[in-house]
Image: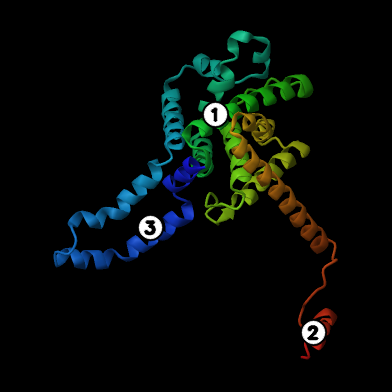
Amino acid sequence: MGDKKGKDEEIESETRFLWKLFVDIMMTPVTFALVLIGRKRWTDLFEPFSYVYRFMFEAKFTIMIIIVNVGVMFASVFFSEELFRSFVNYPSNLLDFGSYYALVSCGFLHGSLVHLFGNMLGIFVFGRSVERKLGSGKTAMIYFGALILSSLFYSVVSLFFMGSDAGAIGASGALMGLVAAAMLLDPFGITYQSVVPLPNIASGWLVIYADISGILGQVNDGIAHFAHIGGFLSITVTMFLLRADERAEMERGFVVNIVSLCVAAAIFFFVSFGYLPSFEFGGAAYQSVLQRMGG
């Protein structure tokens, strides 16, 4: 357990980082004044920059896989169309053992800079959250496990149930494995992927809802929703490669997720169907409350 505590302390939370950065920036005039009177060094003025650098690179696997993805994106500009297509995951590759490498290679290809940025931002946010809890090696295992299993899930569903051989690229399946792990390991950890601070549990369920809606609505949005679902489900396999105490923590996180989802669904149901009383000023329910309070 001591090792896990060390990992938690090594990788800082986003909230703590933002507050410390804010304080450092606000203290810059004071630091400058202290530099002028010789109480601090000129290099102390650049502490916020070094702090940002440490924050960016402290989660070793997370930043490494981002750098690799960005590098492959720019290298792919020079790929021939035939070479590029050979790295794409086509469902029909399941019938060709020699093309199984595409289950992994597809995760390093992206169709545009927007596609790349969205996935890399998600990997940075949720990868840090998982790496803070499990360390670099196990985060890598969850990432690549999700990448392979999400590609397999997409291929099986597309080929045998949808009758489609549409190719899939992108790291989103692997990302969803990280999101699922973060939801279970740290459900109430705050992230800022959408600028607005949201707990992992809320971010994860919003993504799941979007994918299920895309599948049920048969939306032709160019997103491989089944790969996303496969990435989420992959955690049910990769978690068994973790230690018993880490699996127990995930199981507790699963209970927290289910209870929270049920509470949110109940609130939504009561609000949507008018079962909660209206407390508009002058309303009967409002007046009743005032009477009970002696108002």
Near-viewer residue (150 or 1): 1
Residue 240 at x, y percent in the picture = 64, 30
Q: In the rendered image, which quarter contains the C terminus?
A: bottom right
| Residue 56 position within the rendered picture, expressed as x and y whole percent measured from the top left | 40, 44
Q: Please name whichever residue, 206 or 42, is drawn nearer the observer in this view of the structure.
A: 42
Q: Would residue 95 be seen by someone viewing this image from the given angle?
A: yes
Disc 2 is placed on an element classified as loop
Q: Amino acid at mark 3?
A: Leu
Residue 203 vs residue 3: left or right? right
Identified at 42% across, 21% down, the residue is: 78
* Residue drawn at point x = 44 percent, y = 26 percent: 72
Q: Secondary structure at mark 1?
A: helix
Q: Earlier in the sequence, mark 1 or mark 2?
A: 1
Amino acid carrying mark 2 in the image: Gly
Residue 94 coordinates in the image, percent (x, y): 67, 14
- Confirm whether residue 222 shows in the render: no
Task: Give the residue pinned by disc 1.
Answer: 141
Q: Residues within 10 Å of mark 2 (few under 14, many from 20)?
A: few
Tell me which residue sits at (33%, 61%) in the image: 25
Q: Which residue is mark 3?
A: 21
Task: Mark 1 vs mark 3: give the one in front.
Answer: 1
How far is disc 1 from disc 3 in space, using C-alphas? 32 Å
Q: Earlier in the sequence, mark 2 or mark 3?
A: 3
CA–CA distance between discs 2 and 3? 47 Å
